Image: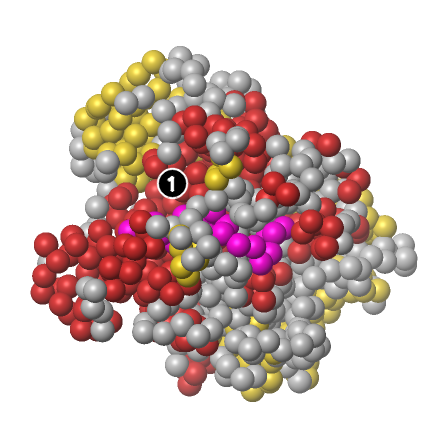
């Protein structure tokens, strides 16, 4: 754990500047609005270590795969949401000396991420080598109300001198990706122009031919009064700037308002990009910085009203959950079904900003309960529209007859992950997509989704599983060979329990949906049959596998085996590992990790969480007790799942400990990797630890259910959630649980198994019980 940030309920605050932490802070203080994002790079020039990052949703590059030797079926590229035009840049000179925080003396440095109102603010005093001192205050945000807009207020106060302060705001489209496989530049210049305190640059991606137009407009204030100043224009390559030389007296405060609009051919016709950007620049300049900032605050007030979690008695926990919710909404708003959620969101280059199985396993529950049915539906439609590609992906690996294998990593639906043990073998991702359809329908009651899209996906997935299992004459059972489960510290294993279980569950669910649709919507079913070339006889094979599947089990301990041979490993406990060799993947060879019993993230435990309703509590307890001791939680996706089950089992101390680990994973840099970007998808797991863990939220036979507990360190907690278009507020205090239906229709729910009906505007309560 590396805690260097202040603990405040609504803000993330860094006091004092440490260059060694700059990359970490660039990640933590990132901004976004679901359509674009920006790492917390400095506006002014900085020659120290930094990862410049500005990203636009949907704009990607197919970076040629870099592998030692090619394998049949390998993707030819890794898709990346690439670093884009640097729109925040403002170079500063003080009496001809350039301001650079790596080359001057810094004091009173403070960086604040205001999560309540959605902006980043930074202040510091700089003493330059020429003896001049300035105080700088920079405020910026990416508008949630106007999805192509960013704005900066950058102020320089002359503390001990008079002379000249020079501002040079610029747009630079000649950018690179640090993780480019072959050091390739992904952008080409198209056009540019600078004029009348404004300007724009147009660039395009190689290969994919996405066009981006970025525009800026600048205005100045002296001691809060607007004034006009002439500029020198610089146009060079993919770079434009205005240089303003401004005479100052001691204590003069000069403020630059820089407005930016970034538009792309993802959303507009290419020929309309430039006029659209110029039009938008005029609108936002007319509105002004303060109005835009007020719009931002209003948007976030509405978002927090619906999704805030209030914790009393634990400021670190309170700050953490708000940080997680804030970053989730900065990454994805759900208003465009073409977009999805990358593990790092818009905060870094690792994982390419593209879609993994994390979305269905972790993010969909969060958006389903905080943003509503339409947003969750868009996440499912993203996969439905990629179904033809999923069938192509399966064909590349030798599967036939409409079998669909969804990719481990994608932006277009085509697989672009290039590690064989993941690309070919971590096929459990197919199952969680099927489960997401089930999870969505049981929450919303939207059975029409099956007719419109869901059943086609389920059929494709079931066809894949039917071909991926094979019959073992030796066992007299169907087996699953050569897979990698969620625990990526095990590769190429046979009969991974989780993979096999979710595979047969997917086929069973597909059969039940087929039967339901045959009965209730026979004409729609016939259309799907025709569209997918589906024959009912196929389900006979599925059922045979379901009936005769081999699921590894240890009779002595009465636990599910993670995979064949797991108990052949030397059995050790994670708590016995010294801190100096953690995380293992940064200290041990891969050979040593693979031969150890240590588990990167929940595997059997992941399955017990997803399919909890299929197992009794003692079965869950035996397996949890065994595997938790061996789990090192070196995946960001792990602690939340274990925390939820620990809450269910009454292990309150462990549940709380794992909550803090997942909630403050980035803020305290548990895994020593926040410099690479934030763990956006696991942040949804943080929300789950409170709502599904401590509050015990479940759907039981179509009915919303709660079995709350209260962590010892908390006086109370409350949260809001949407359920079938009604907004509920759940409050858990030292002795009571209350649920209020704040708006919407009457809601039926269970509290500790007892039924309640709550009308709009009414509240029900129950005594808090211990688990």
Instruction: Find out whether residue 501 is within the magenta segment.
Output: yes
Up-down relation of residue 257 to residue 293 (above or below): below
Quadrant in the picture for the N terminus = top right
> Can you see residue 393?
yes
In this view, the residue in front, 272 or 601, is 601
Instruction: Find out whether residue 296 is within the magenta segment.
Output: no
Up-down relation of residue 700 to residue 593 (above or below): above
- Marker count (numbered): 1
Residue at the (22%, 23%) spot, across then down = 755
Residue at the (67%, 77%) spot, across then down = 69
Residue at the (9%, 61%) spot, across then down = 522
Q: Residues within 10 Å of mark 1 (few under 14, many from 20)?
A: some
Residue 771 quadrant? top left
Residue named by callout 1 = 611
Start and end of the magenta stretch? 488-508
Residue 306 quadrant? top left
Answer with left or right where residue 652 lies relative to residue 157.
Answer: left
In this view, the residue in front, 572 or 23, is 572
SS under mark 1: loop
Up-down relation of residue 300 to residue 178 (above or below): above
């Amino acid at each position: 754990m590396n805690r260097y940030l202040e603990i405040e309920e609504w803000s993330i605050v860094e006091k004092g500047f440490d260059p060694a932490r700059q990359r970490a802070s660039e990640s933590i203080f990132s901004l976004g609005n679901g359509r674009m994002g920006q790492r917390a790079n400095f506006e002014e020039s900085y020659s120290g270590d930094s990862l410049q990052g500005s990203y636009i949703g949907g704009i990607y590059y197919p970076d040629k795969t870099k592998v030692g030797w090619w394998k049949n079926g390998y993707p030819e590229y890794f898709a990346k949401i690439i670093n884009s035009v640097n729109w925040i840049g403002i170079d500063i000179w003080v009496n001809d000396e350039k301001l650079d925080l790596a080359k001057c003396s810094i004091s009173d440095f403070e960086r604040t991420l205001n999560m309540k109102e959605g902006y980043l603010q930074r202040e510091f005093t700089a003493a330059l080598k020429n003896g001049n001192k300035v105080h700088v205050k920079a405020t910026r945000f990416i508008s949630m109300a106007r999805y192509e807009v960013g704005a900066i207020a950058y102020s320089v106060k002359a503390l001990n001198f008079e002379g000249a302060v020079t501002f040079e705001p610029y747009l630079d489209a000649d950018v690179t990706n640090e993780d480019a496989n072959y050091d390739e530049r992904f952008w080409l210049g198209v056009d540019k122009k600078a004029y009348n305190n404004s300007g724009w640059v147009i660039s395009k991606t190689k290969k994919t031919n996405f066009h981006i137009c970025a525009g800026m407009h600048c205005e100045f204030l002296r001691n809060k009064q607007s004034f006009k100043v002439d500029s020198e224009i610089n146009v060079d390559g993919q770079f434009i700037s205005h240089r303003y030389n401004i005479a100052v007296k001691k204590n003069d405060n000069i403020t630059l308002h820089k407005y930016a609009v970034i538009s792309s051919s993802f959303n507009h016709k290419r020929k309309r990009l430039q006029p659209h950007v110029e039009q938008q620049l005029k609108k936002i300049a007319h509105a002004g910085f303060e109005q835009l900032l007020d719009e931002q605050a209003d948007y976030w007030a509405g978002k927090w009203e619906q999704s805030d979690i209030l914790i009393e008695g634990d400021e670190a926990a309170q700050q953490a959950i708000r940080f997680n919710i804030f970053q989730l909404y900065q990454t994805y708003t759900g208003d465009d079904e073409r977009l999805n959620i990358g593990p790092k969101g818009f905060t870094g280059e690792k994982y390419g900003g593209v879609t993994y199985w994390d979305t269905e396993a972790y993010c969909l529950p969060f958006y389903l309960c905080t943003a509503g049915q339409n947003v969750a539906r868009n996440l499912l439609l993203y996969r439905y529209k990629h179904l033809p590609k999923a069938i192509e992906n399966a064909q590349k690996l030798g599967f036939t007859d409409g079998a669909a294998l969804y990719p481990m990593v994608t932006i277009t639906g085509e697989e672009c992950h290039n590690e064989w043990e993941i690309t070919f073998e971590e096929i459990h991702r197919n199952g969680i997509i099927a489960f997401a359809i089930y999870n969505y329908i049981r929450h919303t009651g939207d059975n029409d989704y099956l007719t419109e899209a869901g059943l086609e996906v389920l059929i494709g997935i079931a066809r894949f599983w039917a071909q991926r299992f094979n019959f073992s004459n030796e066992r007299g059972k169907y087996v699953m060979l050569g897979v990698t489960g969620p625990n990526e510290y095990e590769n190429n294993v046979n009969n991974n329990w989780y993979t096999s279980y979710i595979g047969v569950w997917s086929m069973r669910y597909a059969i039940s949906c087929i039967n339901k649709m045959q009965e209730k919507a026979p004409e729609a079913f016939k259309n799907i049959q025709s569209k997918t070339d589906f024959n009912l006889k196929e389900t006979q094979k599925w059922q045979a596998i379901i009936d005769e599947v081999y699921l590894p089990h240890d009779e002595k301990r009465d636990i599910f085996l993670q995979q064949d041979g797991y108990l052949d490993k030397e059995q050790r406990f994670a708590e016995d590992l010294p801190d100096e060799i953690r995380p293992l993947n940064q200290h041990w060879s891969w050979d040593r990790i693979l031969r150890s019993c240590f588990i990167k993230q929940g595997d059997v435990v992941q399955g017990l969480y997803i399919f909890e309703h299929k197992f009794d509590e003692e079965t869950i307890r035996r397996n949890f007790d065994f595997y938790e001791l061996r789990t090192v939680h070196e995946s960001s996706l792990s602690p939340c799942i274990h925390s939820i089950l620990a809450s269910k089992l009454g292990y309150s101390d462990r549940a709380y400990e794992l909550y803090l680990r997942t909630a403050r994973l980035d803020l305290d840099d548990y895994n020593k990797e926040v410099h690479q970007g934030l763990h956006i998808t696991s942040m949804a797991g943080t929300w789950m630890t409170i709502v599904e863990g401590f509050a015990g939220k479940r759907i039981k036979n179509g009915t919303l259910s709660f079995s709350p507990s209260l962590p010892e360190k908390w006086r109370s907690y409350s949260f809001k959630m949407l359920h079938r278009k009604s907004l509920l507020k759940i409050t858990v205090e030292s002795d009571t649980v209350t649920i209020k239906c704040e708006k919407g229709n009457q809601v039926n729910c269970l509290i500790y198994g007892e039924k309640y009906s709550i009308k709009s505007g009414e509240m029900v309560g129950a005594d808090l019980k211990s688990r």
